[in-house]
Image (tube, helix red, strand yellow):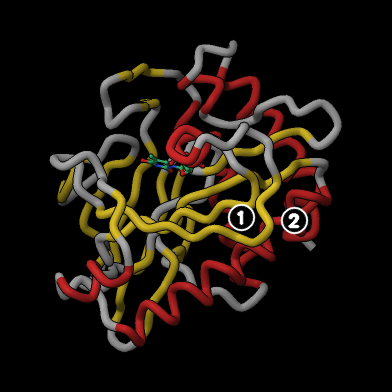
């Protein structure tokens, strides 16, 4: 692949064939706790690439603009080149993870309304939580953009909740990243078992990266099960 640009924890970015595209290649690396825990798992990259591809196609067919252009191999996609807004948006439907820890709420407690939270994208600073007033004060984003991001994140939440429910999965929480292209804001990065908490509706079994974070078994078993459930629903619809 030509034109190496940047190596992240779970993806590598290369220059695209044209000035307005990039090639994003999924790695087999799993990390947690800001990279403190790390492991290589053969096949993880392609599982996440396929999962994210299916989810982005589904979102796109429901009116969400994304960076995805085309898959070029098992682990690589051509994507639109966007200026990433350095804020991670975390959407929560059910208390878990850092939310449960920080606010003393039991994991699994259903939230009365959707919780939106923001972190500054900075490995150096450990992605600190940031509020909208601080985002504006630092000039990271504008009020107009923040309004759009909030609306878009909530819309994506509704679409994903419905999708996962169809395949017997509860969408507990997830993380989104957006980028600017000209006057547009598009969904970037990925949505996969790395960036969501997903629990089986019947058994509560985890099908996401918490299996790795918490040493609960073979993480790829969860990732495979998630992908196969998705392929059996939207995967089929997509091929029509
Ligand atoms: P948290 O409970 O650890 O704050 O995580 C909330 C959600 O965000 C969870 O689905 C995992 C996802 N997430 C990421 O995708 N990347 C990250 O760096 C972190 C901390 C969380």
Quadrant showing the N terminus: top left
The part of the image, by quadrant, that contains residue 239 is: bottom right
Q: Is residue 68 left or right of residue 83?
A: right
Query: In the rendered structure, which disc, 1 or 2, sits on the residue that comes first in sequence?
Result: 1
Residue 74 visible in the snapshot: no
Q: Are dots 1 and 2 in contact, CB under 8 Å?
A: yes
The circle drawn on residue 163 is 2
Mark 2, ligand 1, within 8 Å: the answer is no
**What's the distance in space between the residues labelled 1 and 2, CA to CA?**
9 Å
The residue carrying pointer 2 sits among few (fewer than 14), some (14 to 19) or many (20 or more) residues within 10 Å by Cα, namely many
* Residue 194 to residue 190: above or below: above
| Circle 2: element type | helix
- Comparing 66 with 43, the one in front is 66
Q: Is residue 180 left or right of residue 137?
A: right
The part of the image, by quadrant, that contains residue 226 is: top right
| Circle 1: element type | helix
* Residue 70 to residue 27: above or below: below
The residue labelled by disc 1 is 55
- Comparing 16 with 87, the one in front is 87
Q: Residue at x 36, y 17 (%)?
A: 39
Q: Quadrant of ligand 1?
A: top left
Q: Is residue 159 left or right of residue 177?
A: right
Q: What is the x, y in percent for residue 183?
A: 32, 88
Q: What is the x, y in percent for residue 50?
A: 57, 43
């Amino acid at each position: 692949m030509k034109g190496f640009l940047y190596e992240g924890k779970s993806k590598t970015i290369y220059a695209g064939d044209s000035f307005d595209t990039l090639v994003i290649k999924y790695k087999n690396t799993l990390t947690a706790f800001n990279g403190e825990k790390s492991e290589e798992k053969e096949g993880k990259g392609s599982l996440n690439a396929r999962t994210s591809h299916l989810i982005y196609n589904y979102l796109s067919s429901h009116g969400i603009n994304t960076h995805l252009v085309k898959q070029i191999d098992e682990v690589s996609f051509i994507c639109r080149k966007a200026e990433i807004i350095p804020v991670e948006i975390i959407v929560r439907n059910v208390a878990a993870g850092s939310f449960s820890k920080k606010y003393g709420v039991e994991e699994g407690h259903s939230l009365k309304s959707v919780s939106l939270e923001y972190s500054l994208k900075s490995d150096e600073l450990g992605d600190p939580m940031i509020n909208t007033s601080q985002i504006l004060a630092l000039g990271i984003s504008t009020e107009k953009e923040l309004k759009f991001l909030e609306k878009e994140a909530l819309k994506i939440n509704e679409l994903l909740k419905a999708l996962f429910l169809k395949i017997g999965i509860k969408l507990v929480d997830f993380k989104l990243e957006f980028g600017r292209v000209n006057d547009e804001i598009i969904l970037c990065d990925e949505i996969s078992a790395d960036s969501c908490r997903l629990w089986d509706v019947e058994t509560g079994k985890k099908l996401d990266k918490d299996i790795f974070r918490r040493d609960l078994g073979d993480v790829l078993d969860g990732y495979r099960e998630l992908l196969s459930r998705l392929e059996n629903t939207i995967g089929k619809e997509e091929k029509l």
